[in-house]
Image: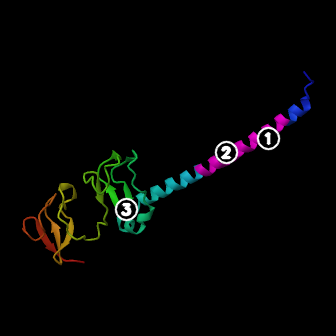
Amino acid sequence: MGKIDWSQLRTAADKIAEQVQREIEKKERDAKGLAENIVILRTIDKIIEELPDSEVEQLTYLYPEWSGAGVNLPKDKKLRRNGKLYRVLQGHVTQPDWTPETAHSLFVPFRDPETIPDWQLPQGSHDAPNTGDRVRHNDLCWQSKIDANTTEPGSDPRWWEEIDCP
């Protein structure tokens, strides 16, 4: 067995240590940049959740896209799916088959409360107009007198009141 050249071994070890140190510093910079991006994203999330409803529809692209991959969604969270904005009706963890288009007890299409939407036949009490809700129907505007109003506007004055359209 030959003599070990300790100076060469030390030089090689020093080079490896320098490479490791550079990698550590790069990872730390990357982690710091990632942390800064997370702070920015959380700030954006907070801002868009506090937007007045009248401004939400113009900024739909800022809201997160729905995912069925076990995401925890709190009540009233807004999110996108296929270009439409939805509001969460009750907090839940997403599943692939509970999409905003099919899980009507979990999601409702978002709409600005100042806008009077066209009346659509409700699929159930979850999407039926409530007391004070306004709709357009047959070129007139109507306001519901009851909660979970599944009747057609104008069909019975006990359930709907005709109002001036803006």
- Residue 133: quadrant of the picture: bottom left
Residue situated in front as seen by the camera: 88 or 166:
88
Coloration of the structure image: rainbow
What amino acid is at disc 1? Glu
Q: Position of residue 161 (x, y in %)?
A: 12, 70
Q: Residue at x 41, y 64 (%)?
A: 60
Image: magenta residue range: 12-34
113 relative position to 136: left or right: right
Gap in angstroms between the C-alphas marked 1 and 3: 50 Å
Residue situated in front as seen by the camera: 13 or 139:
13
Q: Residue at x 25, y 51 (%)?
A: 105
Element at badge 1? helix
Residue ID for mark 3: 82
- Residue 121: quadrant of the picture: bottom left
Gap in angstroms between the C-alphas marked 2 and 3: 37 Å
132 relative position to 87: left or right: left
- Residue 15: quadrant of the picture: top right
Gap in angstroms between the C-alphas marked 1 and 2: 15 Å
Which sits earlier in the primary sequence, circle 1 or circle 3?
1
Residue ID for mark 1: 18
Element at badge 2? helix
Q: Does the segment drawn in magenta span residue 21?
A: yes
149 relative position to 70: left or right: left
- Label 2 crowd bin: few (<14), some (14–19), many (20+), radius 10 Å: few
- Label 3 crowd bin: few (<14), some (14–19), many (20+), radius 10 Å: few
Can you tell which mark lies on residue 30? none
Q: Position of residue 82 (x, y in %)?
A: 37, 62
Q: Is residue 153 above or below residue 124?
A: below
Q: Position of residue 70 (x, y in %)?
A: 39, 44
Can you tell which mark lies on residue 28? 2
